[in-house]
Image (spheres, rainbow, N blue to C red):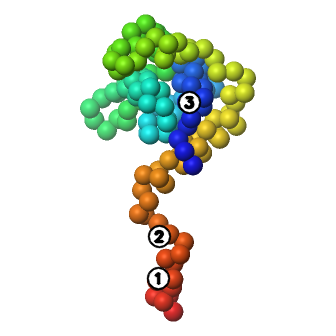
């Protein structure tokens, strides 16, 4: 499988930037922000995702308290507005057109079931990155003699 294509990536970014004030979506958005950026195929969307991931990260303390996400309220809106009005903060190559869709709802088809399907597709990526972990299906014969 491949990472999220540009259309799915766009919907994920729209979800993060439009439904953050909806309590029903907050945990899912936090889970999405904790994902590795390699799940986004489009390099522009990957940059925007990383910007949001870092911009919405809050550090509770330097001790054992885990990181948390700032979701909802003024701080989140400020991070999203900053990326929309100053896209060069994400990366020098990012243009206003690349981030114009942020903050708009992705549509009614983006439901909990859609989100679960998106997660499955996102996590299909690591198999490509680590091909040495599992032997190919034909090489299983070598280890079968050890079991007898």
* Residue 90 visible, this angle: yes
Q: Nearer the viewer, residue 43 or 23?
A: 43
Query: Do the residues bearing badges 1 and 3 touch, measured as CB atoms within 8 Å?
Result: no
Q: Percent x, y for residue 5?
A: 56, 35
Q: In this view, does 85 lie above or below 134?
A: above
Q: Which residue is drawn at 51% across and 83% down?
A: 141
Q: Is residue 79 above or below residue 4?
A: above
Spot the residue most to the left.
62
| Earlier sequence position, callout 1 versus callout 3 | 3
| Earlier sequence position, callout 1 versus callout 2 | 2
Query: Do the residues bearing badges 1 and 2 touch, measured as CB atoms within 8 Å?
Result: yes
Q: Which residue is drawn at 39% across and 9% down?
A: 86
Q: In this view, does 101 lie above or below 115?
A: above
Query: Do the residues bearing badges 2 and 3 touch, measured as CB atoms within 8 Å?
Result: no
In the rendered structure, find residue 80 and report the number of the disc placed on it. none
CA separation in Å, label 1 and label 2: 10 Å
Q: Which residue is drawn at 60% across and 31% down?
A: 8
Q: What residue sits right under mark 3 in the picture?
A: 6
Q: Percent x, y for residue 147?
A: 50, 88
Q: Percent x, y for residue 146?
A: 46, 88
Spot the residue most to the right.
108
19 horizontally vs 114: left or right: left
Q: What residue sits right under mark 1 in the picture?
A: 143
CA separation in Å, label 2 and label 3: 32 Å
In the rendered structure, find residue 135 and report the number of the disc placed on it. 2
Q: Percent x, y for residue 14?
A: 57, 21
107 horizontally vs 11: left or right: right
Q: Nearer the viewer, residue 61 or 136?
A: 136
Q: Helix, strand or loop at disc 3?
A: helix
Q: Helix, strand or loop at disc 2?
A: loop
Q: Which of marks 2 and 3 is in front?
A: 3
């Amino acid at each position: 499988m491949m990472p999220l294509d540009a259309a799915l990536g766009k919907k994920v970014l729209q979800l993060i930037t439009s439904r953050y004030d909806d309590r029903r979506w907050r945990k899912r958005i936090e889970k999405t922000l904790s994902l590795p950026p390699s799940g986004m195929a489009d390099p522009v969307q990957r940059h925007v995702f990383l910007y949001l991931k870092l911009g919405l990260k809050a550090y509770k303390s330097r001790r054992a308290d885990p990181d948390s996400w700032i979701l909802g309220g003024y701080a989140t809106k400020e991070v999203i507005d900053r990326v929309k009005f100053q896209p060069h903060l994400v990366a020098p190559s990012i243009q206003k057109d690349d981030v114009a869709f942020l903050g708009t709802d992705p549509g009614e088809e983006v439901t909990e079931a859609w989100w679960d399907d998106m997660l499955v597709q996102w996590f299909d990526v690591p198999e490509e990155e680590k091909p040495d972990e599992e032997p190919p299906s034909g090489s299983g014969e070598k280890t079968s003699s050890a079991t007898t």
